[in-house]
Amino acid sequence: MNTNYLPSDYLPIVVQLLAALGFIVGSMLVSHNIGPKRHSKKKDDPFECGIPTEGDARTPISVKYFLVAILFVLFDVEIIFLYPWAVNFLDWMKESREMAIAIFVEMILFMGLLLVGFYYIIRKGVLNWNQ
Amino acid sequence: MNVNYIWYFLTFLTLVSAIMVVVVRNPIHSVLYLILTFFCISAHYVLLNAQFLAAVNVIVYAGAIMVLFLFVIMFLNLREYTAESKTNLVKLGAAVLGGVLLVIIVAALRSMQIEPLNKATYNSQVGMVESLGKVLFRDYLLPFELITVLFFVAMVGAVMLGKRETGERNF
Amino acid sequence: MDSTVFIVRSIIIFVIFGITLLIATYSTYAERKVAAFLQDRLGPNRAGPFGIWQPLADAVKMFTKEEFIPAQANKWLFIAGPCFAMLTALMASAVIPFGDTVQYEGQFIAVQGIDINIGILWIFGIVSLGVYGVMIGGWASNNKFSLLGAIRAASQNISYELAMGLSIIAILMMSGSLSLRDMVNQQATPFLGVSGLNWNIFYQPVGFIIFLTCAFAECNRTPFDLPECETELVGGYHTEYSSMKLGFYLFAEYINMFVSSAVISALYFGGFNFPGQAWVASLLPAGALGHNLLTSIGVVVFFGKIFFFIFFYMWVRWTLPRFRYDQLMNLGWKTLIPLAILNIVVTGAGLLFDFKPATWLIVIFVVVLAVISAAQPRKTMRPQQSTV
């Protein structure tokens, strides 16, 4: 088991990044240069099932999507807090059972309070998509 | 390989991309530069061997908050009122606020006491997730539990923001 | 890290890179063959024997097609979208442990790109970045269908990412490490007397189901392929794309399938461990040769598991119909997230009271509920009105 992690472990990532970028830029250049190019007014319009394009596509969207994004940020941060807790769970059990139970109860409290908020959101109908 | 060069390169990249965030006109390009900035900061965390912080920085900032920014910019169609919002008063206010923040940061940095590196007691694994959890759930328990209150307020705020107003046009 | 290790690691990374591309290419062929098999057709059989050169023909076609950029599109972002999708897909494979160590001149070198402390968070971070490619591409096209596909994809990906993160927590509680290699090594211990069979699936059935569902949703595969459902949205976020840019989007999907299959096998199905590996190790010669042979068997077994899950993706694609959007969001938010939290709580309680397979109780409970509700007389269904 590796117990001594160092920043230099990440150096091969640079190699992978360069390989990936090289592959992407290379195939983009190749496909850009060997394909045909023919332009016309109708062809350069966005394809909307043959109906002439009307107005700008970038119209405001339903607020539900934003709410989902905001809730996602909140829950993501919550999950991040769970990681250090979950990783140490076995260590705490080894140290003493009482402490493990105490910290487990704390986390249940944390998640319980969060679930109260989640319940509030569901009751408010934020996540109802079929109306 | 000399670590100093990597550090200089990363810092240069961070500063350039951070300046580009402010300079470019297209808000979407600006968000993309901000994502690049977060990556550079994560790389700095890796150099400090704070691997968990590096990952969390990518997941939360680059992966979650920037998605929210992109959502707002892309799908609110902000292009119509970009020019007229920059009156002189706004510019003056922004300059004053930024200056005050800069003064605060400089003052805080000057008053900070940094312990010199002690090679005998230094533990290179202190930035790993295990040590973070041990400190967070033992010494900083009350702040941790208070975060839920913050989350709760944020959820209520999100619901309030999301109230549908009449006359809106959307999908 | 000295230069020998760095060079070996770079070679490993290049080999994995090549294998990733090869598997992604041949997944397209396999998908068409599996589809043909399931629908009682022949599938591609013109290019070479059994059509095995079909992927090459496809690649040549992709390269020589016209590269089309709509007049109203945002040109640079339009190009950046597929590149970003491809880049995130290609970066994920670095932390996957493909095999045990290789013994070479007294050094043990892990068959893995990088062995880092935060392996699973690396995957998670890359997955959370995958949404940018779709969003940028769909928005830059300036097409109403692309835009709809992009918001759908983004909302779906971020919703299922939450349940995915929560389902990993339960595994972490049992393994006590974020490193994928540590997690795989822990599954090498005997289970019911069979060595190398202590797989997490026997302790985490609920977590596995949640993770699998979320992996399908993250890869935009059927039954979660709403971002590109052709009956409603033409081509979804890649409606306007052609030539290799379209190829990148499709390719990224297959690479993501490969990576997620590898992660599923590593987390829940023992990675490179296989039943009876202690017995096999005792048959092999001692020393470096035997060790390396065992490692290579492990790599082959690992790829076998990966291929099974890739096949599973295709199998499901031609078996299940697509969800409706409100069903998809309800499943993600109102079912999977509470279930994942319950899974964490039950796992924690099970660990505290020394009963590791505690989450089977959830499975039993759900099955009993399902049987009871199935036994009741069916209510007449009214069609739901949907305006979203």
Image: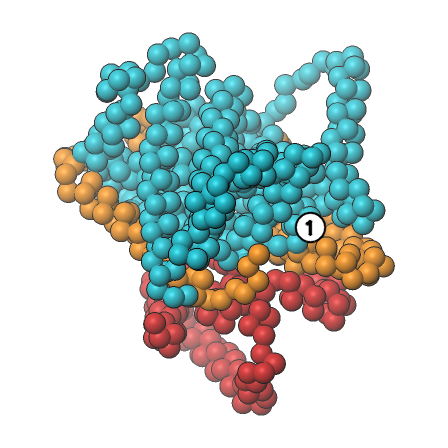
Chain colours: A orange, B red, C cyan
Give the SS element for disc 1: helix
Q: Quadrant of residue A110?
A: bottom right
Q: Tag 1, which chain?
A: C
| Residue lying farthest to the front in this orientation | C285
Q: Position of residue C164 (x, y in %)?
A: 59, 43
Q: Residue at x 80, y 20 (%)?
A: C372
> In the image, residue C174 lies at what x, y percent?
69, 48
- The picture quadrant where one finds residue C366 is top right
Considering depth in this image, is C3 or B64 the residue closer to the camera?
C3
Q: Nearer the viewer, residue A64 or C100?
A: C100
Residue at x-position 43% and y-position 12%:
C39
Residue C367 seen from this side = yes
Q: Amino acid at mark 1?
A: Met
Residue C309, position in %: x, y? 50, 30
Classify A19 as above or below C143. below
Q: In screen coordinates, is C329 left or right of A92?
A: left
Count the marks: how many? 1
In front here: A108 or C362? C362
Query: Where in the figure is residue C296, as x and y percent of width and height?
Result: 44, 40
The residue tagged 1 is C173
Quadrant in which the N terminus of chain B appears: bottom left
Give the residue drawn at x 60%, y 70%. Answer: B126
- Of C275 and C337, nearer the camera is C275
Q: Above or below — where is C123 with respect to C199?
A: below
Asked if residue B90 lies left or right of residue A53, the reply is right
Residue drawn at (45%, 14%), measured in percent from left and top? Answer: C38
**C321 left or right, relative to B10:** right
The answer to whether residue A14 is seen in the rendering is no
Q: Quadrant of residue C143?
A: top left
Q: Residue furthest top?
A: C40
Crowd tier of the residue under label 1, counting other residues whose Cα lies within 10 Å: few below 14, some 14–19, many 20 or above: many
Whether residue C320 is situated above or below residue C109 in the rendered picture: above
